[in-house]
Image (cartoon, helix red, strand yellow):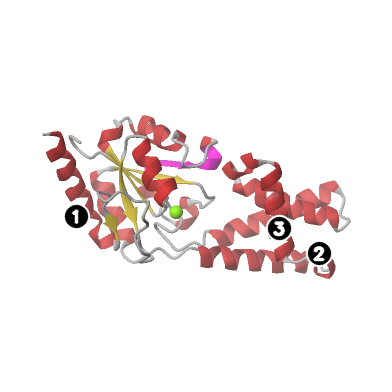
Amino acid sequence: MGTLRLVCFDLDNTLWHVEPVLVRAERETWDWLVARVPDLAICFDAAWVREKRTQLLRARPDYVHDLTSLRRDAMREMLLASGRDEPTATRTATEAMDVFLHLRNQVELFPGVLDALERAHRRYTLAALSNGNADLKRIGAGRLFDVVLSAETVGRAKPHPAMFERALSDAGVAADEAVHVGDHPEHDVLAARGAGLHAVWANPLALPRPGALPADVPALDRFDDLDDVLERLAADAGRRRA
Ligand SMILES: [Mg+2]
């Protein structure tokens, strides 16, 4: 690494804890649906919709690149099964998805994230690479990212290299000048390394270190340490090359 120029970040469970957000968003979207279509509650529940998502994904694995369509189509299937006609089912499912996406972006950033991103933004090109459907603009961090990519916009989910390659070409940097910071051992760390980038394992939830992680991958436990971790990574890479 000559100079570190591009820092990519995963979003869910890297910049915020996603599971509590999804649980609440699913519950409140269900409440919204039942308020709109009360007889849904007689034969269906939120678990039915989850099971329908699993079935749809099994039938059409490419849904993994478009989780918004997967969620919307599962709700649409339920509305059709409840006797609604096609236009009504489609319209109601689309409105329910708007409710879900609003709630899904009500995230609470991990401590230190915003300050660390502000500092990094002054120094590096920043990219967001997510398999999920978070919206950085709605979250209020959009202005800090120069490149924003998702499985839905790129058409391939991590660990596929497409999102990493797009980030490099959009930022105009070589893989060796880029690092990806993410929580998932395979989808983030190993996938980034496979695409030639450096990698940092984000561990804001203080999980045990996964055995799949190579020993030389640095861990980021607190965002306050981001500058130090990136500087050390760049120095180590420079030394290895010298
Ligand atoms: Mg993640």
Q: Position of residue 109 (x, y in %)?
A: 40, 63
Q: Position of residue 124 (x, y in %)?
A: 26, 43
Q: In the image, which is nearer the foreground, mark 2 or mark 3?
A: 3
Q: Disc 3 on helix, strand or loop?
A: helix
| Residue in the image at 31% along x and 64% along y | 112
Q: Disc 2 on helix, strand or loop?
A: loop
The reply to whether dot 2 and dot 1 touch (C-beta < 8 Å) is: no
| Residue in the image at 58% along x and 59% along y | 102
Q: Which residues are magenta?
A: 145-153
Q: Which residue is mark 2?
A: 37
Disc 3 packing (10 Å; few <14; some 14–19; many ≥20): few
Q: Position of residue 45 (x, y in %)?
A: 75, 66
The reply to whether dot 1 and dot 3 touch (C-beta < 8 Å) is: no
Q: CA distance from mark 2 to mark 3?
A: 20 Å
What kind of residue is marked 2? Val
Q: Which residue is mark 1?
A: 228
What kind of residue is marked 1? Asp
Disc 2 packing (10 Å; few <14; some 14–19; many ≥20): some
Q: Is residue 210 magenta?
A: no
Q: CA distance from mark 2 to mark 1?
A: 53 Å
Q: Which residue is mark 3?
A: 51
| Residue in the image at 18% along x and 40% along y | 237
What kind of residue is marked 3? Glu
- First of labels 1, 3 by sequence position: 3
